[in-house]
Amino acid sequence: MKQLNKTITGLVSFVLIISGYNGFSQSAQKASVNIAINYFNANNSIPHLVVNAKTRVNGRFQPVGGIAVKLLLDKDSAGTTIGKVVTNEKGEAASFIPPSVKQEWASSKTHTFLAVFDGNNKFEATKADLTIAPARMLISTNDKSITATVLQLKDTSWVPVKGVDLKIGVRRLGGDLPVNETPTFTTDSTGQASADFKRDSIPGDSKGNIVLVAKVEDNDQFGNLSVEKTVPWGGKFKYVSTFDRRTLFGTRDKAPIWLIFMSGGVILAVWITLILLVRNIFAIKKIGREAR
């Protein structure tokens, strides 16, 4: 009888341990995901949001793709839904602010964007928010001087904002190049920051046009703002075709003479080495037969 009781007690304990272990495993399968919202407004046009999702794996953050995030303006109610986006393989998703929230947008001078993830079988549900005050940027030029202005909407008028850090540069393919040796500028009491253009030798298009860019990055109050202006301050770029010349980028029959001799010499040296190796192998075999 005692042995039977021990057996039953052991079985019950085993079942409880297994069920507890399974429950722990199922809960451990769900990881936490971090969501961040970034606000962008380029050239004072329709603003848009970029959502970033990431999770910690082995002590490092990794992007999370394929999760659906609901974007809202100020609150979760009718007329405040911005849209529902799905992150890509980089953990990013973007959405413009649609006309459907125009009434809500105009009702306040400060807005809070909400990002809601309801969770799935891999990640727990989470939320994120970002509070932004609508602002705009202006850019003007005088001779070789550039002035960027930051304005904030208060009541019914745009007022200058003091103490905003911004960058003034030239748009290039690999990124924006600063217009001078100063990397950042700060607006004064008039909301303006000025910079002298010192990139006189920079190439432009066929007419010498370059694109000036003034931008505010990751500002706690205004998010990311940028404005552009095209000016004829660059060198005129004239395309010269080298199709009929001997260049490294030409066709096979237009290869440079020095490259032909170099490649031919390498090929000849390889073949001579192979021939000598084969000759030496036969010579060694012949010497071996004579030694017998």
Image (spheres, rainbow, N blue to C red):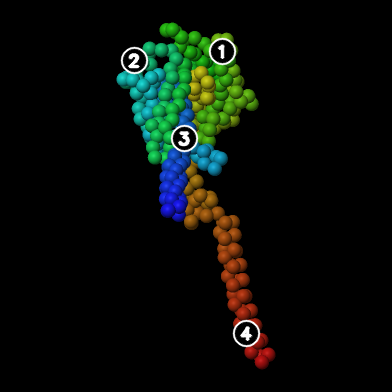
Residue type beneath disc 1: Lys
- Number of residues whose C-alpha sits closer than 10 Å to that of mark 3, classed few (under 14), some (14–19) or many (20 or more): many
- Number of residues whose C-alpha sits closer than 10 Å to that of mark 1, classed few (under 14), some (14–19) or many (20 or more): some
Mark positioned earlier in the residue sequence (1 or 3): 3
Residue ID for mark 3: 33
State the residue in front, 3 or 125.
3
Mark positioned earlier in the residue sequence (3 or 2): 3
Report the label total: 4
How many angstroms separate mark 1 from mark 4 (CA)?
90 Å
How many angstroms separate mark 1 from mark 3 (CA)?
36 Å
Residue ID for mark 4: 285
- Number of residues whose C-alpha sits closer than 10 Å to that of mark 4, classed few (under 14), some (14–19) or many (20 or more): few
| Tag 1–tag 3 contact (CB < 8 Å) | no
Q: Could you tell me which quadrant the C terminus lies in?
A: bottom right
How many angstroms separate mark 1 from mark 2 (CA)?
29 Å
- Residue at disc 2, secondary structure: helix
Q: Is residue 75 left or right of residue 238?
A: left
The numbered mark at residue 162 is: 1
How many angstroms separate mark 4 from mark 3 (CA)?
71 Å
What residue is at 47 percent from the left and 53 percent from the top? 251
The x and y percentages for residue 250 are: 49, 51
Mark positioned earlier in the residue sequence (1 or 2): 2
Residue type beneath disc 3: Val
Residue ID for mark 2: 103
The numbered mark at residue 259 is: none
- Residue at disc 3, secondary structure: loop
